[in-house]
Image: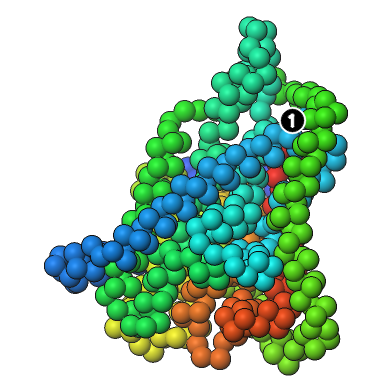
């Protein structure tokens, strides 16, 4: 008998083999959904609809005439052109860079492939606004669309590299062998066989990059490039949640929904699983000529220099210039403490909020539960500034006691980052045998206690991974914290932003370095999980 199940037994219960015949009918069917868990799922799902409802209600209250006046202005057209141009230029470049580097590190004889693979993932540890800080302090004249595209590609291409590289490791080369036996050249095999199998990975990574582009504030504010997010923040600061900021938030939310629809359309209904018995074998890497290998090494070195060399050298330069005086421990330690407190509490609350939906989706899959699960993802697809504006409006009008309190901040974190915990937790619960949970219930343990004492113990690694991802997302979160945090709240991100706004790059460097050091464990976890999923 397993240890979690033995602890779930009533006192003095003797070990016994629980057979399917000994179980009640409800247990054999997987039990019925616990009512209070279902209620929590519905409540959290409805709460996740808050940002989208906020956009719709504001539009109705504003009226068509005012909407036309606010939206059909040259300024809105300029923001739309900037935002759309940014997405249309950055996403394809990230796809090209992510797929190219993934092929080199996974399918070629590039020297030092494991090292280059790790270096391609490492830029995730550097927050996007720290990338911008490094480049602006190196080239102060850097600004505009070209600068936005350059820094965005540098900051976000790993989100495409990771899924593409993981997919390339798992692909069965049988289809490629068949194509080669039919006389297809290596180039045609890649375009007609390999690339179509990367469709899901490319689509998912492109969606993630696009949503980051729409939500990012610090990166573009620092290089003086106006997008919807920077304009909304400026409007909020000047008019305090005025109609103009709300209307811009509505347009931004519609852009996010459009990206979601495009990704779903691109994904389609095609299946990519291998059919047949047996196991997939590894493919022999393509041999590079000495000249091509040297060129590819130069390319990987240039990417590493741009993505990691510039931020680290810039930070090192400012820290050397500041010396020991650049470390203001009297403000740095409190900021670190508040960051750790917010991140830890937010990760715990978000993971707890994800438990009901994860359990229902695994134990009681149904069309209705899939609808509730989809609601959980809507808020995370909205930019943090839209979530923050929705919470500001709701708390001012209907929940004034919690306005600008930590409760509102934690609520924003749950809405924005719950899917990160949900995905990992759901995977962990799926690996926990349902029979153990049913056996515990058949021995008199309540469904809630069986979930807590049996299933969650077995799913603990997945829950820990999800909590770690939420923890580090909160560590680098900027926009919602700036808008919602109580007066006196100073995290590493907000302190860094305050100092860079004053062009005090020397004093900002320690805060940036600490954020990178806190992000390194998650980056290692992502890289390790990616390789372990392929058995490497």
Where is the C terminus found, in terms of image quarters?
Answer: top right
State the colouring used for the structure image.
Answer: rainbow
x and y, in percent, of residue 74 in the image: 28, 64
Q: Residues within 10 Å of mark 1 (few under 14, many from 20)?
A: some
Residue at 74% across, 58% down: 308
In the image, is 254 to the left or to the right of 28? Answer: left
Number of disc labels: 1
Does residue 232 sit above or below 429 in this rendering? below
Residue 392 showing in the rendered view: no
Q: Quadrant of residue 165?
A: top right
Name the residue nearer the viewer: 238 or 504. 504
x and y, in percent, of residue 446 in the image: 53, 61
Name the residue nearer the viewer: 105 or 36. 105
Residue at 61% across, 18% down: 188
Residue at 58% across, 24% down: 191
Residue at 47% across, 53% down: 86
Name the residue nearer the viewer: 408 or 94. 94
Residue lying farthest left?
65
x and y, in percent, of residue 445 in the image: 57, 60
Does residue 238 sit above or below 282 in this rendering? below
Residue 75 showing in the rendered view: yes
x and y, in percent, of residue 332 in the image: 71, 85
Residue lying farthest front?
141
In the image, is 141 to the left or to the right of 227? Answer: right
* Residue bearing mark 1: 107
Does residue 249 sit above or below 91 in this rendering? below
Q: Secondary structure at mark 1?
A: helix
């Amino acid at each position: 008998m397993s240890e979690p199940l033995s602890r779930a037994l009533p006192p003095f219960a003797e070990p016994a083999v629980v057979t399917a015949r000994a179980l009640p009918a409800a247990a054999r069917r997987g039990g019925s959904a616990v009512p209070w868990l279902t209620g929590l799922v519905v409540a959290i799902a409805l709460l996740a609809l808050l940002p989208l409802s906020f956009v719709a209600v504001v539009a109705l209250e504003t009226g068509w005439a005012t909407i036309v006046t606010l939206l059909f202005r040259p300024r809105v057209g300029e923001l739309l052109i900037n935002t759309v141009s940014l997405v249309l230029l950055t996403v394809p470049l990230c796809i090209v860079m992510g797929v190219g580097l993934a092929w080199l590190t996974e399918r070629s004889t590039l020297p030092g492939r494991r090292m280059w693979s790790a270096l391609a993932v490492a830029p995730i540890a550097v927050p996007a606004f720290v990338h911008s800080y490094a480049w602006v302090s190196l080239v102060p004249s850097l600004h505009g669309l070209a600068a936005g595209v350059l820094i965005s590609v540098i900051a976000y291409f790993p989100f495409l590299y990771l899924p593409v590289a993981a997919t390339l490791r798992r692909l069965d080369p049988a289809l490629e062998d068949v194509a080669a036996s039919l006389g297809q050249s290596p180039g045609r095999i890649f375009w007609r066989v390999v690339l179509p199998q990367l469709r899901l990975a490319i689509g998912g990574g492109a969606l993630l990059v696009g949503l980051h582009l729409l939500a990012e504030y610090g990166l573009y504010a620092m290089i003086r490039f106006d997008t919807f997010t920077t304009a909304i923040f400026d409007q909020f600061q000047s008019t305090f949640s005025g109609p103009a900021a709300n209307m811009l938030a509505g347009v931004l939310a519609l852009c996010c929904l459009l990206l979601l629809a495009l990704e779903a359309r691109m994904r389609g209904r095609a299946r990519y699983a291998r059919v047949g018995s047996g196991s997939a074998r590894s493919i022999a890497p393509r041999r590079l000529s000495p000249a091509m290998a040297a060129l590819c090494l130069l390319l990987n070195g240039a990417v590493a220099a741009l993505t990691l060399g510039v931020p680290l050298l810039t930070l090192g330069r400012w820290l050397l210039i500041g010396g020991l005086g650049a470390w203001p421990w009297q403000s740095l330690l409190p900021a670190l403490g508040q960051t750790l407190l917010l991140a830890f509490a937010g990760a715990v609350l978000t993971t707890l909020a994800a438990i009901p939906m994860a359990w229902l989706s695994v134990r009681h899959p149904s069309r209705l539960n899939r609808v509730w699960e989809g609601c959980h993802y809507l808020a995370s697809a909205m930019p943090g500034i839209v979530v923050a504006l929705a919470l500001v409006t709701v708390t001012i009008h209907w929940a004034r006691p919690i306005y600008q309190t930590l409760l509102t901040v934690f609520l924003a974190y749950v809405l924005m980052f719950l899917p990160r915990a949900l995905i990992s937790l759901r995977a962990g619960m799926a690996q926990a045998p349902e029979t153990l949970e049913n056996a515990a219930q058949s021995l008199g343990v309540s469904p809630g206690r069986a979930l807590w004492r049996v299933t969650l113990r077995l799913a603990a690694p997945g829950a820990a991974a999800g909590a770690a991802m939420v923890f580090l997302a909160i560590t680098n979160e900027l926009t919602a914290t700036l808008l919602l945090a109580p007066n006196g709240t100073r995290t590493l991100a907000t302190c860094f932003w305050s100092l860079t706004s004053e062009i005090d790059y020397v004093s900002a460097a320690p805060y940036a370095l600490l954020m990178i050091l806190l992000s390194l464990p998650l980056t290692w976890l992502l890289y390790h999980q990616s390789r372990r999923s392929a058995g490497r």
